[in-house]
Image (cartoon, rainbow, N blue to C red):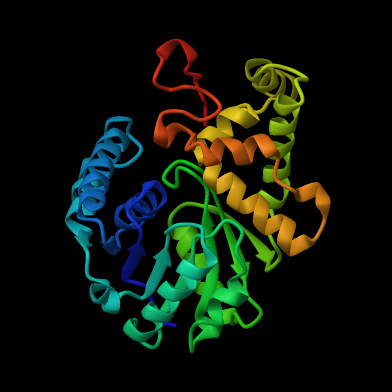
C-alpha cells in the first residue's frame, strides 16, 4: 500500500476536528467534511486555537503549526474526499447512519483507499458489509480529545486485511499514538471495561449510595483516576455512554450491561453533559462545575 499523503475525515465535531488536527500537524493533507457549514467554521476555529496552544507550550514548532493550517481544507461535499488515502468517519454513534455513509464512501473513495471508523463500540464487520471493500475497512478508535490522549484502539473486522491493519497502525504511530489491537466484539477493549464502570456509577447515584461529588471523589482519590466516572461521562456525552451500553447489552446478551434507568432518564431529558451545558453536573453554574484532569 502506497504511503499515505491525504486523510479525509467525516464529521466536524470534537472527535473529527481533533483527528483532522492530528493529521495536519503530522504533515498530511486533510479534507474535513461535514454537511453543517457552521460545524466546519467552529471546527476550523477550534483547530486553529488548539494548534496555537500547542505551539505556545512548545509541543510543536511554529513552522509545523503554520503548515498544519495550510494543509487543512474543509468541505460540505463528500466527493472532495475522493483523493484521500484513508477516510476516517467520526459521526453519530448509529450503526444505520454509519452504514449508509460507508456505502456512499465506497462509491466515492479511490479503490486503494482505507475506510476507517472512529466508532467506540459498533461492529466493524457489519459496517464493512455495506461496502465492496471489506478487506479495507477497519476500526480506528481515538480517545477524547484526540490531540491529547495517547491511545488509538485498532479494531479488525472479520475480513480486514493484514495490509490494511499495518497501514492503519503505522498512521496512528505517525500521529505519535500508542496502539492496541482488538478483535471485533462489542465494546472492543476500552469501552468493554470503561462503560460498565460508568454505568455502575450511575447505579450508585440512582440507588442513593452516595452523592455525585462523593462518587467522583472516591474514584479519583481512592483509585487514582484523573477524573471521576460521572465527570467523565459528562465529558464523553451521556448519549454516547447510553449508546455504547445498548451495544454491549445487545451484543453480549448479559443483563449486567443493561443501561441504568437514571442514565436513560438523563438522556431522555436532554441532559447530555458538557456539550449541552448540563448532564450529571450543571455546567451553567460555575459553583457546580467540576474540574476534570486529562
Q: Horizontally, is 273 left or right of 253 in the view? A: left
Q: Position of residue 35 (x, y in %)?
A: 26, 62
Q: Nearer the viewer, residue 36 or 181?
A: 36
Q: Horizontally, is 254 left or right of 12 in the view? A: right
Count the marks: 0
Residue found at x 54% / y 74%:
127
Q: Position of residue 92 (x, y in %)?
A: 45, 57
Q: Does residue 15 appear in this view? A: yes
Q: Nearer the viewer, residue 202 or 9?
A: 202
Q: Horizontally, is 144 left or right of 82 in the view? A: right
| 290 vs 151: above or below | above
Q: Does residue 188 appear in this view? A: no
Q: Nearer the viewer, residue 260 or 161?
A: 260
| 190 vs 220: above or below | below
Q: What residue occupies the far top of the structure in this picture?
A: 287
Q: Say which quadrant the N terminus sits in.
A: bottom left
Quarter holding residue 138? bottom right
| 245 vs 279: above or below | below
| 33 vs 146: above or below | below
Amino acid at each position: 500500500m502506497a504511503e499515505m499523503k491525504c486523510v479525509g475525515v467525516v464529521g466536524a465535531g470534537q472527535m473529527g476536528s481533533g483527528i483532522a488536527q492530528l493529521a495536519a500537524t503530522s504533515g498530511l493533507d486533510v479534507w474535513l467534511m461535514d454537511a453543517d457549514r457552521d460545524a466546519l467554521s467552529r471546527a476550523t476555529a477550534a483547530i486553529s486555537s488548539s494548534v496555537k496552544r500547542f505551539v505556545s507550550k512548545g509541543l510543536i514548532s511554529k513552522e509545523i503549526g503554520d503548515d498544519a493550517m495550510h494543509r487543512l481544507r474543509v468541505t460540505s461535499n463528500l466527493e472532495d474526499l475522493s483523493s484521500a488515502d484513508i477516510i476516517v468517519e467520526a459521526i453519530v454513534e448509529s450503526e444505520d447512519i454509519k452504514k449508509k455513509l460507508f456505502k456512499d464512501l465506497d462509491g466515492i473513495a479511490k479503490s486503494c483507499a482505507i475506510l476507517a471508523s472512529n466508532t467506540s463500540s459498533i461492529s466493524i464487520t457489519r459496517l464493512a458489509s455495506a461496502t465492496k471493500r471489506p478487506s479495507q475497512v477497519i476500526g480506528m478508535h481515538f480517545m477524547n480529545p484526540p490531540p491529547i490522549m495517547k491511545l488509538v484502539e485498532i479494531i479488525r473486522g472479520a475480513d480486514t486485511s493484514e495490509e490494511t491493519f499495518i497501514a492503519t497502525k503505522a498512521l496512528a504511530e505517525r500521529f505519535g499514538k500508542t496502539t492496541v489491537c482488538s478483535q471485533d466484539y462489542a465494546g472492543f477493549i476500552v469501552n468493554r471495561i470503561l462503560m460498565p464502570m460508568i454505568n455502575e456509577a450511575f447505579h450508585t447515584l440512582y440507588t442513593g449510595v452516595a452523592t455525585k461529588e462523593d462518587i467522583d471523589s472516591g474514584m479519583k482519590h481512592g483509585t487514582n483516576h484523573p477524573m471521576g466516572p460521572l465527570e467523565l461521562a459528562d465529558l464523553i456525552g451521556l448519549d454516547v455512554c447510553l449508546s455504547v451500553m445498548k451495544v454491549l447489552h445487545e451484543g453480549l446478551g448479559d443483563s449486567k450491561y443493561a443501561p441504568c434507568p437514571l442514565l436513560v432518564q438523563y438522556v431522555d431529558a436532554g441532559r447530555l453533559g458538557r456539550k449541552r451545558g448540563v448532564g450529571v453536573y450543571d455546567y451553567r453554574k460555575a459553583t457546580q462545575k467540576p474540574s476534570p484532569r486529562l
